[in-house]
Image: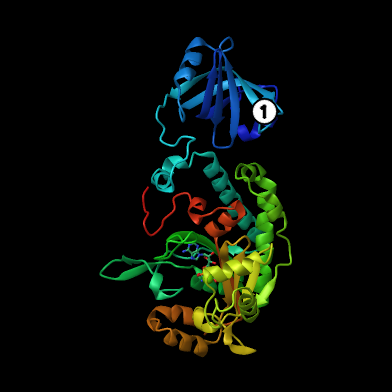
Amino acid sequence: MTPIATIEKLADFAGQQVTLRGWLHHKSSKGKLHFVQLRDGTGYVQCVAFQGDVPPELFEALGHAGQESSLILTGVVKAEPRAPGGFEIGVKGGRVLQKVEGFPITPKEHGPDFLLQNRHLWLRSKRQWAILRIRDAVITAIRRFYDEQGFVCVDSPIFTPAACEGTSTLFEVDYFDDAKAYLTQSGQLYAEATAMAFGKVYCFGPTFRAEKSKTRRHLTEFWMLEPEIAYATLDDVMQHAEDLLCYVVKSVLERRRTELAVLERDVGKLEAIVPPFPRLSYDEAHAILEEAAPGQHRHGDDLGAPDETILSNKFDKPVMIHRYPHEVKAFYMKRDPEDPRKALCVDVLGPEGVGEIIGGSQREEDLDTLLARIREHGLPEEAFGWYLDLRRFGSVPHGGFGLGLERTVGWICGLEHVREASPFPRMMYRIYP
Ligand code: 4AD
Ligand code: MG
């Protein structure tokens, strides 16, 4: 019996005959030879079918098979130093399961709208294959990191009764009996509850923002990783963000070299992601901006995309900006006891102008102060009863952050737009397919 192999594991079968099951990625024919680029999801390999070596029906069928025809091929795994994966297949037999003609996405250039409209098929392109396999490696690295560090994964709900990150970007849904629910903007408030039960926790799931922005950094549905740590201070939170990002990048460099090469990613830029990361206070960041672009950033305002670009371009590593004015940050952030005009928060800006990839803080742990903040922000007090209980029963200092998965993958892959980092991106003007 010929073993069934996958392209990524061909080295284990060098010199042997194997069966590969996949799709025709590309084909060229020359007289008595068909050169079939086969893809099986794990990789790409050239399969050479010589007329004299294969049954005539197969040779004929391969001649008519277009891009994305489904195929099963049996052949010998031969070392081929010039081939990308180091091997090629000398075809002996097999069959075409479905002959395809007219696959819409061809090697020629297509516009982004056409590709997004055909996302279900575009996923089969080599570049998309590489990006989504890197996304997978990022997710795996995150889960391994937390498991190794003794964190417990406790997920937050998606239907929620109230806002976490401001009321302007909430998606409202009809719940039963005329009640309203909202799709979660962040699992943080629930992660705070689970941190008080389990100590070190994380949640990792989809989050939703009705962002009316059409920038290359915004999706309306994206995945967020949110660690939350009992007894952590802002410094602990920053250290933790640095440890996590270094671990994730290192793991991708170990496991996804082929995919990074497909993307022509400059891996030198990723190899430079080692501790320590620069840490700047908001005031220091403002001073740098004043110097670089006088008048662009008003002290007291949040950082805009052009400000973030200037700051991140100054460093070859992620840069941490901490202690923003509390007015531009969320209600739950603790104020800095050294300067109460500031929040004990941090934004991590990715390098190469990718913008904010992480936002986090130390949380307000005092009951009365937190209640006052909820009132100041005009939030519905009733909905936060349970959250305030966390400050009534064994309140402790704690903190955490949210990491945007698609922005992180976009940075690691060197993407122009976050939409390619999501299998089926959801944006203001796109919910199909
Ligand atoms: O800075 P944000 O809004 O922080 C929170 O939601 C906190 N509650 C997280 C926490 O402390 N547990 O969002 C966190 C990250 C951002 O840094 C960004 O990477 C990503 O989520 N993000 C988006 N990614 C894609 N599209 C959007 N519309 C995003 N909004 C935020
Ligand atoms: Mg933020």
Q: How is the image coloured?
A: rainbow
Three-letter code, disc 1: Phe
Q: Is residue 11 left or right of residue 385?
A: right
Residue at label 1?
A: 87
Identify the residue shown where x is 73% and y is 61%. 274
Q: Secondary structure at mark 1?
A: strand
Residue 368, horizontal then vertical, whole percent: 50, 90
Instruction: Name the one closer to the observer, 144 or 73.
Output: 73
Query: Which of the pair 215/46 is nearer the observer?
Result: 215
Residue drawn at x 66%, y 58% is: 145
Compared across the picture, whether 423 is left or right of 395 comes to left
Question: Quadrant location of the N terminus?
Answer: top right
Is 76 situated above or below 428? above
Please determine whether, in this image, residue 382 is positioned above or below residue 316. below
User: Which residue sits at x=70%, y=22%?
Assistant: 15
The percent position of residue 251, horizontal first and vertical second, equals: 68, 52
